[in-house]
Amino acid sequence: MRKGFILACIASFILLYEDFNHLLVLLIVGGFEFEQAAQKAFGHSSFTGAILIGSIRLIPFVSLIACATCTKLLDSLKGRLSLCLSLLVAVGVIFSGYWSITSPLYTAEHASSTSAIAYIFVPITAYMFSFAAGASAYLLGKVYEVVIKGK
């Protein structure tokens, strides 16, 4: 289970690359053809930019992998559920955050001139929300064990 969870974290980190999200926005919201969308989404990509933003996007995934490898959370059902819920929340927050950064560029909404700074705060927000979701799920599982099962 540990290897599967770690692979899920790594796959999520790679698939949440901000230019992939930009590509989806171009295809779905912008109505571009795939070739045009790919050229526009990846046209200004750079290795240093990917490393910079990727290192910030790494924050919630490193903490989840550390929890999976350094604790015994994956040995119990409530631990597995809390870690999986944390991963889902992190993925959801990052995806929706990146979507909300790029979608105003292709709609009638007004795009803020400082919206690019959100690329820094979205993973930090994802970390906080995923921690809260995982801790809440674990505590609810613990309460269920004590109150309902009487352990």
Image: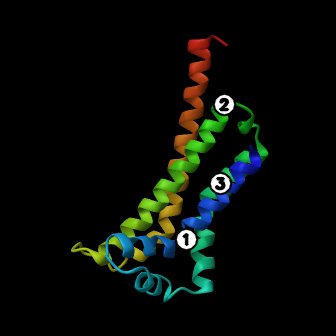
Other residues around mark 1 within 10 Å, as few (<14) / some (14–19) / many (≥20): some
| Separation of residues labelled 1 and 2 (CA atoms) | 30 Å
Q: Amino acid at mark 1?
A: Tyr
CB of mark 3 within 8 Å of CB of mark 2?
no
Q: Earlier in the sequence, mark 1 or mark 3?
A: 3
Which residue is found at the position 36% from the left and 66% from the top?
100
Q: Which residue is mark 1?
A: 17
Other residues around mark 3 within 10 Å, as few (<14) / some (14–19) / many (≥20): some
x and y, in percent, of residue 151 in the image = 67, 13
x and y, in percent, of residue 135 in the image = 58, 38
The disc label shown at residue 8, or none: 3
Which residue is found at the position 42% from the left and 60% from the top?
96
The coloring applied to the image is rainbow
Q: Is residue 138 above or below residue 64?
A: above
Which residue is found at the position 66% from the left and 51% from the top?
64
Q: Secondary structure at mark 3?
A: helix
| Separation of residues labelled 1 and 3 (CA atoms) | 15 Å
Other residues around mark 2 within 10 Å, as few (<14) / some (14–19) / many (≥20): few
Q: Is residue 141 above or below residue 109?
A: above
x and y, in percent, of residue 115 in the image = 38, 74
Q: Amino acid at mark 3?
A: Ala
x and y, in percent, of residue 89 in the image = 51, 49
- Can residue 36 be seen in the rendering of this structure? yes
Q: Which residue is mark 2?
A: 77
- Can residue 111 be seen in the rendering of this structure? no
Q: Amino acid at mark 2?
A: Leu
